[in-house]
């Protein structure tokens, strides 16, 4: 079953997601596994967001 979940709860996202998609102003900036996204995000906006919320 496919499910899309939108959240700002990063702990929840890391636990349940198979893929993490990070959007900013309706533009897709990251499409990665949870490990890739949380450990080494490529996009500067995603990096800044994670610094603020983690």
Image (tube, rainbow, N blue to C red):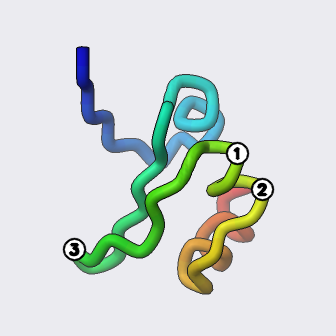
In the picture shown, does residue 32 fall above or below 9?
below
Q: Quadrant of the N terminus?
A: top left
Label 2 – label 1 distance at C-alpha: 6 Å
Label 1 – label 3 distance at C-alpha: 23 Å
Give me the residue at 53% from left, 41% from top.
Answer: 9
Answer whether labels 2 and 3 touch (C-beta < 8 Å).
no
Q: Secondary structure at mark 2?
A: helix
x and y percent of residue 26 in the render? Answer: 21, 74
In the picture shown, does residue 37 fall above or below 11?
below
Q: Secondary structure at mark 3?
A: loop
Answer whether labels 2 and 1 touch (C-beta < 8 Å).
yes
Q: Secondary structure at mark 1?
A: helix
Give me the residue at 66% from left, 68% from top.
Answer: 41
* Disc sitting over residue 39 in the figure: 2
* Disc sitting over residue 26 in the figure: 3
Give the left or right position of residue 49, taking residue 30 as reference: right
x and y percent of residue 36 in the render? Answer: 68, 54
Front residue of 29/11: it is 29
């Amino acid at each position: 079953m496919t499910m899309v979940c939108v959240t700002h709860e990063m702990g929840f996202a890391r636990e349940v997601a198979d893929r993490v998609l990070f959007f900013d102003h309706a533009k897709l900036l990251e499409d990665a596994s949870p490990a890739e996204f949380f450990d080494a995000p490529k996009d500067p906006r995603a990096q800044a967001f994670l610094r603020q919320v983690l």
